[in-house]
């Protein structure tokens, strides 16, 4: 099942227009997540919307937006009033300008989206806009409204499609001066920099995100599978710290010595490619053991074997779950 579009409308460059759909390029739905449950009953915790003063539950139709101006004083804003100030870009991504990609500060980047033609018509106009941006080697800057808020979006070609990245406004980006002003201006010797560069060269390699492994997610899945299998859980020993660095030069030299025995980043990656992957790119949830019954203490009791705990099998991959749009 394909993910649902977050937004549908039109992409416009001057008089050239085509229908498009915006899909999230990333997702957190495949990560292991938890619900809050009652320890005594195993039942899920439910949250209610209540009046802060009376404690009475409030229905959805009686809830409106309010801007706080003073203690217990709010300015009520209705949905109709918000719709009245909606901007023209509600249903159209209007390309306003083209800028060099290098000019966009990374701090302004929020999240990426895929922008694709919506339906069978408009592919020609879509291709014209895409190839125009590609030929100019620039990024198109436009505006799009998501969840009633107007966002700046940067569009750039990605293979046969367009990738749009939401950008922050200047008031959302904090100045680095308030954080960096107290950093001391230290003098570094050439020997220190040469040793540090040697370490960097030893660890240098190509950017290959498919080799990244979420160790915490893997540990979560292993923990859940062990508990479902009735295996005992042993506490992990606290890692040993290296202590404070007394002499920077000595620390660099020791790092060089340690790196001599360790494989280079390139060799390590080649070795990783030859191993069987521990997780699929689509998400780690498929490594969880299939669910045999309902949650709670009863399920744990059913999952636990009557005999002495045995070594758990490797996580069994269940059929892939349908992904939801974020």
Image: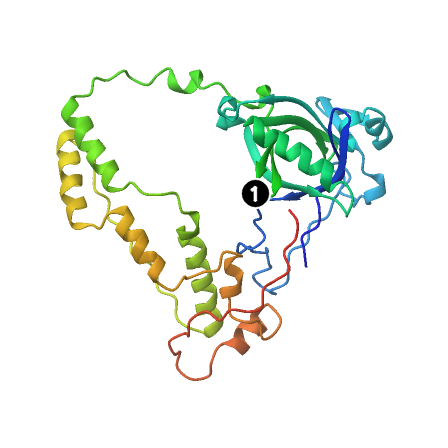
On screen, residue 97 versus residue 222, left or right, reads right
Residue depicted at x 59% and y 52%: 29
Q: Where is residue 230 in the image (x, y as percent from the top left)?
A: 45, 74
Residue 98, picture quadrant: top right
Quick one: quadrant of the N terminus? bottom right
User: Dot 1: few (<14), some (14–19), or many (≥20) neighbours within 10 Å?
Assistant: few
The residue furthest bottom is: 307
What colouring does the structure picture have? rainbow
On screen, residue 316 versus residue 79, left or right, reads left
Q: Where is residue 96 in the image (x, y as percent from the top left)?
A: 68, 22
Residue depicted at x 17% and y 34%: 252
For the residue pair 209 and 247, the one nearer the viewer reads as 209
When the figure is inspected, residue 203 is found, relative to residue 246, above or below; the finding is below
When the figure is inspected, residue 320 is found, relative to residue 212, above or below; the finding is below
Residue depicted at x 63% and y 56%: 323
**Residue 164 visible here:** yes
Residue 233, picture quadrant: bottom left
Q: Where is residue 300 in the image (x, y as percent from the top left)?
A: 53, 72
For the residue pair 202 and 66, the one nearer the viewer reads as 202
Q: Where is residue 119 in the image (x, y as percent from the top left)?
A: 77, 47
- Quickly name the residue at label 1: 159
On screen, residue 12 versus residue 255, left or right, reads right
When the figure is inspected, residue 322 is found, relative to residue 97, above or below; the finding is below
Residue depicted at x 58% and y 36%: 157
For the residue pair 230 and 138, the one nearer the viewer reads as 138
**Residue 138 visible here:** no
For the residue pair 319 and 186, the one nearer the viewer reads as 319
Tell me the element at label 1. Answer: loop
């Amino acid at each position: 099942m394909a993910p649902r579009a977050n937004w549908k409308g039109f992409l416009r460059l001057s008089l050239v227009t085509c229908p498009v759909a915006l899909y999230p390029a990333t997702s957190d739905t495949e990560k292991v997540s938890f619900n809050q449950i009652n320890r005594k009953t195993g039942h899920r915790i439910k949250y209610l919307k209540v009046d802060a003063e009376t404690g009475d539950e409030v229905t959805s139709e009686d809830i409106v937006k309010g801007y706080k101006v003073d203690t217990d004083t709010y300015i009520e804003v209705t949905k109709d009033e918000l719709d009245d100030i909606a901007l023209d870009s509600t249903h159209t991504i209007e390309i306003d300008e083209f800028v060099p990609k290098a000019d966009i500060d990374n701090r302004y980047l929020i999240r990426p989206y895929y922008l694709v033609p919506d339906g069978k018509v408009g592919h020609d106009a879509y291709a014209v806009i895409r190839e125009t941006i590609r030929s100019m080697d620039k990024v198109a800057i436009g505006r799009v409204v998501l969840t009633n808020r107007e966002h700046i979006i940067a569009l750039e070609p990605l293979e046969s499609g367009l990738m749009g990245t939401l950008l922050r406004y200047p008031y959302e980006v904090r100045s680095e001066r308030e954080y960096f002003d107290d950093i001391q201006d230290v003098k570094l010797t050439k020997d220190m920099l040469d040793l540090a560069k040697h370490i960097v060269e030893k660890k240098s390699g190509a950017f290959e995100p498919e080799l990244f492994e979420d160790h915490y997610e893997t540990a979560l899945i292993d923990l859940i599978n062990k508990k479902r299998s009735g295996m005992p859980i042993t506490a992990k020993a606290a890692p040993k710290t290296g202590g404070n660095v007394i002499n920077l030069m000595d620390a660099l030299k020791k790092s060089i010595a340690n790196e001599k025995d360790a494989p280079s980043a390139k060799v390590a990656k080649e070795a990783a490619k030859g191993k069987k992957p521990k997780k699929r790119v689509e998400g780690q949830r498929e490594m969880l053991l299939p669910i045999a019954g309902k949650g709670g203490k009863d399920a744990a009791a059913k999952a636990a074997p009557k005999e002495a705990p045995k070594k758990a099998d490797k996580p069994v991959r269940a059929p892939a779950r349908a992904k939801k749009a974020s």
